[in-house]
Image: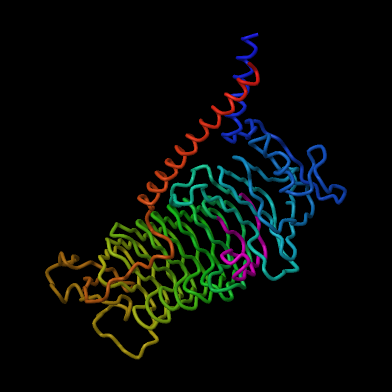
Amino acid sequence: MNRTKVLVLIIVFVVVIDFTNGNLDKQDISTVTCVLSNSKVFTQCQDSVCPSIISCIRKYESSYSNINIHVENGYHICKQTTDYKLKHHLHIDIRPLDQSSLTKPIFTCQRDTSFLRLKTTFDLTINISNIVVDTNQLKQFRGSLITIDAQSSNPSLSLYHEPNSNVLTLNNVVLNNANSMPSIKHYYTEAGSITLDYISLIINNCTINNSQSTGGISSLSVMKIKANRLMIRHSTISNSQAFNGLSGIYFKGKDLEIFDTVFDGNSMPGTSFFTARTYNASVTFSRFSNNKVKYGGCLVLHSDSVLIDSNVFDRNHGESASALLFDSRDTENYLTNNSFTNNFALEQGTLYIGSGGNHYLNGSIFDSNIGKSAVDIYFGFRNLTMFGGTFINTTTISNNQNLSYPQFPEYALNMTTTVPMMERNPDLKGGCPSDFQTIQLQNGNTTCLKIHYTNEPEYVYEEDDESWRPLHYIALLIIFLYFLIFCFLMYWLIRIIKIILNYLYKIIF
């Protein structure tokens, strides 16, 4: 009898502890497959067939950690207008049911619906493959086609402490005609196609076309990403417009990688088409063409380290840095084998270097660029080293003719001094003085170039509304406060458990 009583007490104790800890997650590591049907017969999930993405997730997330959503071919209607909050750690895979089909399932987002809207404080990975998403019958106060807010349950932690597992991967996905129409009360910070907070984005072999935003000044036409990483590979982003907003793409995070991607025909009324604030930025084998920005430039990079290699910047229009502006934090930055052609800068520079550190410009071509001053390159108090570059057909729209560049295109470089090599020292025979760079001109002549520093004001890095560096001290303080609260709750929990056990003991005995 005594053994029975002791066993009952132990069971009650375990149940109480389990309940107070909120351990209600019954997930296992198994996988479930849900078929997404476009048939009107299904209004709710039946035998693993569901009418929407969210209905699949809602049905299985408490029991499975991996949910495969296989989409029937044909046309589907987007059905989500509000955010769905996930309750567990999840991996979600969305792809066509028939992998061998040459056609992709097509989702049409009408009025104010979105393809996917999620919120979570748990670890989340999502793969979306071989899907087309389009919009029509637009309605005011609509947000992005894809919106995910994966901010940590501890909001004091920095952006860069997000779990590495938080990743959205788009593979062979087409997003057409997205149009966010935010207001101050509805979707105010959402971009046209994609808005992500605290979840990294990988875009591979995708197309984003005619993405727009007709909202306020904070809206963006294509995407707004705050996460550890943004990777865009083998993709095309074209014909986007932000009618009232600042730019097309904004990324704030740790690592930016752009590879073999085309950005063409995008038009912005603000400061840039693509703005990134990162620790590391790599842009290689890509093309930026026919992009127009009213005030700034096509690509603006604020980064600790920059690699710009084998890219084409052609026919871009802007006020400053019509093709590329970058500033970094006193590191070495490399621009190699790039082509800057037919760009128009109303004020300064096809290429605008607004940072300290050492800059190496190797093997780049500047051809037929037009501007008011410093048409090809604009820089102030910077260290610039050039090897094997070509400057041809530079055209200035200013009436001021600067004659300090013998045998060198006028306004090719601002704040520089050049002299013909043989005129400076006939005995050099092919080499420049140690304080000059040797420049091979298009006509075969050689010119020595030296950077001439002026009292040009230092470029001031402009922070946005959030801190650039992690808020370590605030995070530690809040963690300490959480620890005190935890100790306080545990003290009262133990007292309550003792009271319950004493009460049960009196009843049983």
Majority secondary structure of magenta residues: loop
- Tell which of 350 and 214 is nearer to you: 214
Residue at x 15%, y 75% (from the top left corner) = 424
Viewport quadrant of the C terminus:
top right
Extreme residue in the right direction: 41
Q: Residue 193 magenta-drawn?
A: yes
Q: Is residue 40 above or below residue 295?
A: above
Is residue 102 left or right of 93 when viewed as pictured? right
Residue 109's quadrant in the figure?
Answer: bottom right
Does 500 sit above or below residue 381?
Answer: above
Residue 451 in the image: state x and y as whole percent. Answer: 23, 71
Give the image quarter of residue 447. Answer: bottom left
Nearest the viewer among 508 and 116 is 508
Residue drawn at (65%, 59%) of the image? 145
Q: Is residue 383 left or right of residue 348?
A: left
**Magenta segment, which residues?**
171-196
